[in-house]
Amino acid sequence: MGRRKVEIKRIENKSSRQVTFSKRRKGLIEKARQLSILCESSIAVVAVSGSGKLYDSASGDNMSKIIDRYEIHHADELKALDLAEKIRNYLPHKELLEIVQSKLEESNVDNVSVDSLISMEEQLETALSVIRAKKTELMMEDMKSLQEREKLLIEENQILASQVGKKTFLVIEGDRGMSRENGSGNKVPETLSLLK
């Protein structure tokens, strides 16, 4: 009697779901351990059950070393996620600037608390970071399109140069005195390719 193929869908029975999670979690951790041994690699497995309980396992290195390496390797992505989270928590830029302007008008300056000023400063710094990131993104896109255009122009230039290089031109140098003369005193025309 062989194994039957299990259809991958949510298990409706809660106790069956918990048993399956426990068995498959143990199997996953065992496979990760085996892969770590076979390939001399560091592997971390993190699983969160339906009830919110956290299970983790690390092979090769300890969990904190693996997570530190992950954070270093994906620092830009994590920074972008953090920035996106901050953006969601703050007001749109126009509203933010209007609030700052209204709070900093001379009549209201005395009524603004330090906490409020710190909050506004953080929001302005975040807005500025978003604007700078967008500016950098647009500049990189422009630079990429210019590089692509440059590549096309170089290719076109090479095609034209090869077409011109196939032809030879008669160059008669008269007044400069650089041409050779034959025995009868007549100047001999020289043929030169346009590109050497």
Image (cartoon, rainbow, N blue to C red):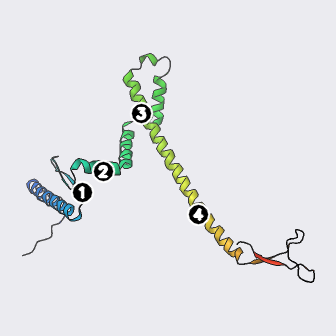
User: Is residue 32 toward the left or the right of residue 92 in the image?
Assistant: left
Q: Is residue 4 above or below residue 11?
A: below
Residue 108 in view, yes or no: no
> Of discs 3 and 2, which sits in the foreground?
2
Query: Mark 3 = which residue?
Result: 123
> Of discs 3 and 1, which sits in the foreground?
1
Query: Mark 1 = which residue?
Result: 42
Percent of width and height locating residue 127: 45, 37
Report the label total.
4
Task: Name the residue furthest right.
Answer: 185
Precedes in sequence: disc 3 or disc 1: 1
Quarter of the picture holding the N terminus: bottom left
Q: Secondary structure at mark 1?
A: loop
Q: Amino acid at mark 4?
A: Lys
Whether the residues at callouts 3 and 2 have beta carbons within 8 Å, the answer is no
How far apart are labels 3 and 4 at the CA level?
42 Å
> Of discs 4 and 1, which sits in the foreground?
1
Query: Mark 4 = which residue?
Result: 151
Whether the residues at callouts 3 and 1 have beta carbons within 8 Å, the answer is no
Whether the residues at callouts 4 and 1 have beta carbons within 8 Å, the answer is no
How far apart are labels 3 and 2 at the CA level?
30 Å
Whether the residues at callouts 2 and 1 have beta carbons within 8 Å, the answer is yes
Query: Mark 2 = which residue?
Result: 69
Percent of width and height locating residue 40: 23, 61
Q: Is residue 105 above or below residue 182?
A: above
Q: Secondary structure at mark 2?
A: helix
Residue at 81% x, 78% y: name it: 190
Q: Amino acid at mark 1?
A: Ser
